[in-house]
Amino acid sequence: MLSSGILSRIGNTPLIKLSRLLPASSAGVAVKPEYLNPSGSIKDRIALRMVEEAERQGRLRPGMNIIEASTGNTATALAFVGATKGYRVTLYVPKNATSEERIRMCRAYGAEVIEVDIEHGDFLKESGVHGALVEFIPRKICHEKEQRDPEHIWWARQFSSQYNIAAHQDTTAQEILEQTSGKVDAFVAAIGTGGTLVGVAMALRNVDPSVKIIAVEPKESRTMRNGKLTVPVIEGYSGGILLQVAELADEVIAVGEKDAVGMCHRLAEEEGLFCGVSSGANVLAALQVAQGLGPDKQVVTILPDSRDRYTFVERFTT
């Protein structure tokens, strides 16, 4: 059967039980390989939803320019969706904080990639700085450009868009509920923008309020300590969804970069799952949660992207 178009292939990813990595007397752990989406990451879901909602509301029209600030997968996903729909896409990425692989992928989809100097000190260039901070200056540029020319420019605003959350409520979570017949005892996800964790958590708790929600983040760049945010939330620029993460998460597990990379290798070698470093962190945390829950319970986590995006630098960042 012919597909109606490449965008129709976004979502409906499988849910796969881990087998060789699970210790005895552990709860089951199932993973959702989101790298099977067309541009290779879970961000295809939010890119499509944000773009189509903007079209529906008349804020994004033919001939307009989509812009976004991103260090990673959202940039690629918007470049892909924009190419498919015929929009010009311009991406502002912080210099020295975005991998060459991702920049090349965005340009391959026809997007313009502008590397932005980070002006407020060397600390923003460190690998241990969360995306909510390192992308601040590129976001400021996006805000100013949209303000100056709203008739021709639409800024996606991934960190504050409620359609980031809605995409996961309406697709990712519904797939998980169907694939598990509604039996999920714990959901584990890296924080990132917060959209995946918040959207899936809200939908799962609508079915079962007792579901445990576990947030995962790099030990080297914490966004939350003792249930409180450690990064600024600035209206219009950063992190509004992170406030909802703080409200929903029962626990935050910090995973070291070296450990995340190690689990990434094990997933490829022992489970045949060629996934990225954030996937390694998610699975490491999920296994920890599963051991605490014990048998006859079910833990679900996400494999956000593939390992081919980390060929030269294997780093757990959000």
Image (cartoon, rainbow, N blue to C red):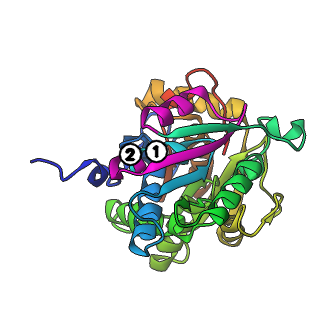
Q: Indicate yes or no whether the magenta region holds residue 101.
A: yes
Residue 107 shown in magenta: yes
For label 2, the residue is 83
**Residue at the top extreme of this rendering:** 312
Instruction: Tell me where residue 302 appears, x and y as whole percent.
Output: 49, 49
In this view, the residue in front, 13 or 312, is: 312
For the residue carrying disc 2, how many other residues have a C-alpha within 10 Å: few (<14), some (14-19), or many (20+)? some
| 120 horizontally vs 22: left or right | right
Give the residue drawn at x 51%, y 75%: 205
Dot 1 crowding, Cα within 10 Å, few <14, some 14–19, many 20+: many
How many numbered badges does the structure rendering display? 2
Residue identifier under label 1: 79
Element carrying mark 1: helix
Q: Nearer the viewer, residue 297 or 299?
A: 299
CA gap between label 2 and label 1 equals 6 Å
**101 lies left or right of 216:** left
Query: From what the image shows, is residue 166 above or below residue 155?
Result: below
Q: Is residue 180 visible?
A: yes
* Circle 2: element type: helix
Residue depicted at 58% across the width and 57% down the height: 293
The spot of residue 269 in percent (x, y) is 46, 23
Q: Is residue 28 visible?
A: no
Q: Is residue 243 above or below residue 36?
A: below
Residue at 75% of width from left, 47% of height from top? Answer: 130
Residue closer to the observer: 254 or 275: 275
User: What residue span does the magenta drawing correspond to?
Assistant: 82-110
Furthest residue toward left = 1
Q: Amino acid at mark 2?
A: Ala
User: Could you say where residue 105 lies in the image, as x and y percent from the top left?
Assistant: 48, 32
Q: Are marks 2 and 1 in contact (CB under 8 Å)?
A: yes
Residue type at numbered disc 1 = Ala
